[in-house]
Amino acid sequence: MIRRVLMAAALAGAAIVVPASPAQALYPCAAGNYCLHTWYTDSSRTQVRGTYSINCEGTAYRWGVQQGYLVYSARPCNDPPPEV
């Protein structure tokens, strides 16, 4: 009986410890693609806050703060790079 009460108290306490805001889910990156998630301070996209990318070899890179206005882009690895 005491074990049930302690278990219920532990579960109730765990339910209170919740992040203040839900984590923003990332878009999935299909194999054979270069994928880039870019976070901006607002929808005008004038200031980058952070990035998360997955290169053609499947290696992930993170930089800055992954929070704010998210823009996602992907391109096939066998496509030529975009012209500048």
Image (spheres, helix red, strand yellow):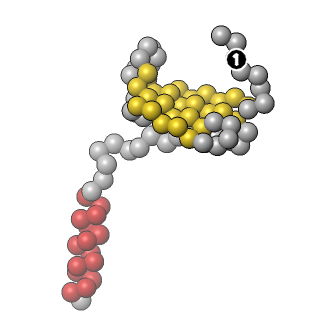
Using the image, determine if residue 38 lies above or below residue 62: above
**Left or right position of 78 against 29:** right
Instruction: Using a 10 Å C-alpha cutoff, classify the residue at mark 1 as few (fewer than 14 neighbours), some (14 to 19) or many (20 or more).
Output: few
Residue at position x 71%, y 43% in the image: 31
Quarter occupied by residue 78: top right
Is residue 14 found left or right of 22 in the rendered image?
left
What residue is at 71 percent from the left and 21 percent from the top?
81
Q: Secondary structure at mark 1?
A: loop
Residue 61, above or below 5: above
Disc 1 residue type (three-letter):
Pro
- The residue that disc 1 covers is 82
Please tell me which residue lies in front, 30 or 21: 30
Quadrant where the N terminus is found in the figure: bottom left
Residue 13 position in % (x across, y down): 24, 65
The number of callouts visible is: 1
The residue located at (38%, 22%) in the rendering is 41
Frontmost residue, 31 versus 45 = 31
Does residue 28 appear left or right of residue 4 in this picture?
right
Q: Is residue 76 left or right of residue 43?
A: right
From this viewpoint, is residue 70 visible? no
Quarter in which the C terminus is drawn: top right
Residue 82, relative to residue 77: is it above or below?
Answer: above
Q: Determine the residue located farthest toward the bottom in the rendered image.
A: 1
Residue occupying the far top of the picture: 84
The answer to which of 74 and 7 lies nearer the viewer is 74
Residue beneath the point at 49% across and 42% down = 25
> Quarter of the image holding residue 67?
top left
- Residue 29 seen in render: yes
